[in-house]
Image (cartoon, helix red, strand yellow):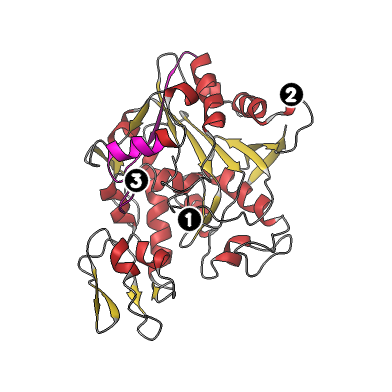
Amino acid sequence: MKSPVYFASIRACSDRECTTAKIQRLFDRAGFPGLIAPQDKTAIKLHFGESGNDGFISPVYVRQVVEKVKEYKALPFLTDTNTLYLGGRSNAVEHIGTAILHGFDYAVAGAPLIIADGLNGKNIRRVTIDKKHFSEVSIAGDIAAADSLIVLSHFKGHCVSGFGGAIKNLAMGCAAPEGKRAQHNARPFTIPEKCTGCATCMKVCPKDAIRVKKKKSVITQELCIGCFECMHACPEHAIDIDWETEIPQFMERMVEYAYGAVQGKENKVGYMNFLIRITPDCDCFPFSDAPMVPDIGILASKDPVAIDAASFDLVNQQQGYADSLLTAHHQPGEDKFSGVHAQTDGYRQVKYAEEIGLGSGKYDLIRL
């Protein structure tokens, strides 16, 4: 059965068509008022952006969702979880500081900010799912404890999962570091003939799992947590992973965590995907590259699989920008995400999510 996905274009020619007004209309048209009850502690799950990144969803847009939640007498709070890697979000103190620096304070966004897995990522609730890879998953305690959940996702590329949308926001975003580590089953390795021994990978490794020996980096697999920071940072592309055997499992593990994040919240979760500044990489990067395609608009749905499928299709219908990281697939209809990360298959998220019952990959796109 097809799931409804509501779409508002980024185009505007009057005050009624401004982006903030469209967000509020999407909230109502998608049926989100029926997801929340008076006094619900409603988690608004988003990504505050790594320090140096500016591709994240604008706090001005987030404020529109906060005000709608308040309109229906619920108690909204902004939330995310701590990261595996080092940076500006690996503990709640620095994480909150980064969020405030990016405009997610009470004065702008209108809601308190809670890091859902606690000071050092130890606030965890085990959730039973009984799926292929996991019998239970480790979800951030304050997300699990929330009465309702609105998931706001910046839809963009990702070097391993192809794209990041609602599914990935649920999976990685709602997991404590322990859960993130469980999803990252893949372990990178060095390609010696490409490695120059520059030690860039060693400097970014959060677990001191890399050493430079005889002018080549060596990764100690027993210490590696699979965060892929070394692969992102290597200027010579001398670090890789086993795409054929490990990445399909990574994608399935990620989807199973998304399934676990919404357990106990049946008919209490809504999703918005922002197809604005569609960058090649995740907002976890400490920078934002140029967009791959033009801004498209905003989608809303009660189905995380349908909204990601619709977002994927809308992006691929665009003409790709020549002056971007896209090296192939510029034409409308071609897969833009594999055009920047050639070995990825982002749509695998949708197919496996549908297989385990997270939602439907079939959708009706309803334009406002």
Q: In this rendering, does residue 228 appear at all?
A: no
Residue drawn at point x = 40 percent, y = 70 percent: 234
Q: Residues within 10 Å of mark 2 (few under 14, many from 20)?
A: few
The label shown at residue 340 is none
Of circles 3 and 1, which is in front? 3
Q: Position of residue 269 (x, y in %)?
A: 47, 32
Kind of residue indicated by mark 2: Asp
Assess whether residue 85 is covered by the magenta stretch.
Answer: yes
Q: Position of residue 64 (x, y in %)?
A: 56, 25
Q: Secondary structure at mark 2?
A: helix
Q: Earlier in the sequence, mark 2 or mark 1?
A: 2
Q: Amino acid at mark 1?
A: Tyr
Whether residue 265 appears in this view of the structure is: yes
In the image, taking residue 117 as reference, residue 50 lies left or right, namely right
Q: Which x, y percent locates residue 65?
A: 53, 26
- Quadrant of the image containing the C terminus: top right
Q: Which residue is painted at 28% across and 48% down in the image?
A: 177
**Label 3, label 1: how far apart the Cα atoms are:** 32 Å
N-terminal label among 3 and 1: 3
Q: Amino acid at mark 3?
A: Gly
User: How would you rate the neighbour count of disc 1 (Cα within 10 Å): few for under 14, some for 14-19, many for 20 or more?
Assistant: many
Dot 3: few (<14), some (14–19), or many (≥20) neighbours within 10 Å?
A: many
Mark 2 touches mark 1? (CB < 8 Å): no
Magenta residues? 72-99
* Mark 1, secondary structure of its residue: helix
Q: As drawn, which residue projects farthest toward the right? A: 13
Give residue 306's quadrant in the image. top right
Residue positioned 66% across, 31% down in the render: 19
Q: Which residue is mark 1?
A: 352
Q: Which residue is mark 3?
A: 88
